[in-house]
Amino acid sequence: MYEPKPEHKFSFGLWTVGNRGRDPFGEPTRAALTPVQLVHLLAEVGAWGVNFHDNDLVPIDATPAERDQIVRDFKAALAATGIVVPMATTNLFSDPIFKDGAFTSNDPAVRAYALQKTINAIDLGVELGATVYVFWGGREGTESDSTKNPLDALKRYREAINFLCAYVKDQGYNLRFALEPKPNEPRGHIFLPTVGDALAFIATLDYPDMVGVNPEVAHEHMAGLNFVHGVAMAHAAGKLFHIDLNDQLFGRYDQDFRFGSVMPKQAFYLVKFLEDVGYSGSRHFDAHAYRSSNYEDVKAFARGCMRTYLILKEKAAQFNADPEVQQLLAEINADDGTFSYLSAGYSRETLAKLRATTFDRAALGQRDLPYERLDQITLEILLGVR
């Protein structure tokens, strides 16, 4: 029942299953695998797609001949396994040139290089089939606001995204952009820290229809925010172009745990939301296996991400079909139509009718809201005792 299928659109990045277990305090614990080996690993565990940063696939110092051979080998692995490339992105954070940002760097030469690098990476992503291109501004920020004017930085950011949108349109690519918010790490403060910030920024762009968001569980949890609410806001705005699934305790560093492994109740609400609204995009697991894992355990990690999603999908269907749940929801959301006239919006007649209405504040304040019971049922469904 919990085996992944292509229609589930489960994807992983080369940087996820290919993570070598290195952290700020320790060296790698796993040997490096090639992109071709990682594609075959993903095929073995039943994934549908693979995503990559440009330099996950092609090293930043590769020669043109080396680049072409790597891409040929990667294409052959995709063809042999049936794995697809739904999303690509650019590494604008690892190389020392980006120590003060890429699109928002104070150095115009760095900003120009970042544009050039991204254009080349967009070409590579499109060549391999990507239809979504993600921008994570890991270095777009500050440690001290003495060092960078935020208005100048946002202007530079806007100009870069506008330039790249125009490039994609000029090339006739079938590609949409998705901004990935994060509040901090590796910079002390990152521009566009939350879904709300990203949505507000998109409204200022030249081509806002081309740009959406790629919210990530861990990034919103780092700021102590309710991830489902951010996803709902993105969906309501028509901007949920992609999503990164992992797990994360509130207020910690970016932990990137296996999906649903530490906050399963929050993961349940997320899966329920995505399934209820019919989200049709990739379900991308931007997570890492424990540093203690070998590659057999990395496979268990990848299988676990997908299996947990499918289990929670089943639990969401059970919640939706539970008679008591539906009865409670019907009572909570009871509406006899008395105030349906308000949905038509403002008019002087509507205003007069509203002003003439007498409300029984005491009775409304005493209305029964059985939220404890509803939440307990949710918990019992998740614990498998209902």
Image (cartoon, rainbow, N blue to C red):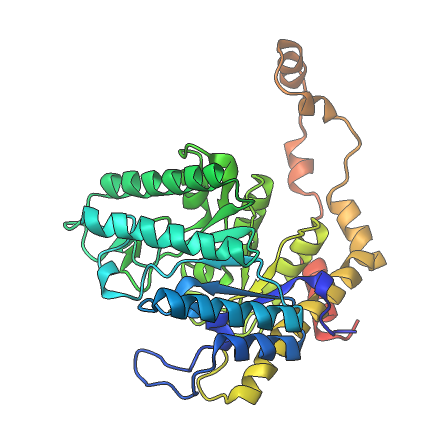
> Which quadrant would the C terminus be assigned to in this image?
bottom right
Estimate the x, y position of residue 215 in percent, counting from the top left.
50, 54
Q: Is 123 left or right of 373, judged from the image as shown?
A: left
Q: Nearer the viewer, residue 135 or 239?
A: 135
Estimate the x, y position of residue 212 in percent, counting from the top left.
50, 44
Q: Residue furthest left?
A: 146
Q: Nearer the viewer, residue 99 or 87?
A: 87
Q: Residue at x 35, y 79 (%)?
A: 23
Estimate the x, y position of residue 317 in percent, counting from the top left.
78, 60
Q: Is 334 left or right of 39, judged from the image as shown?
A: right
Q: How many marks?
A: 0
Q: Residue at x 65, y 73 (%)?
A: 80
Q: Is 112 left or right of 368, judged from the image as shown?
A: left
Estimate the x, y position of residue 267 in percent, counting from the top left.
60, 64
Q: Is residue 29 above or below residue 189?
A: below
Q: Is residue 81 above or below residue 179?
A: below
**Looking at the image, can residue 48 be seen?**
yes
Q: Residue at x 37, y 85 (%)?
A: 28
**Looking at the image, can residue 214 be seen?**
no
Q: Is 28 left or right of 365, judged from the image as shown?
A: left
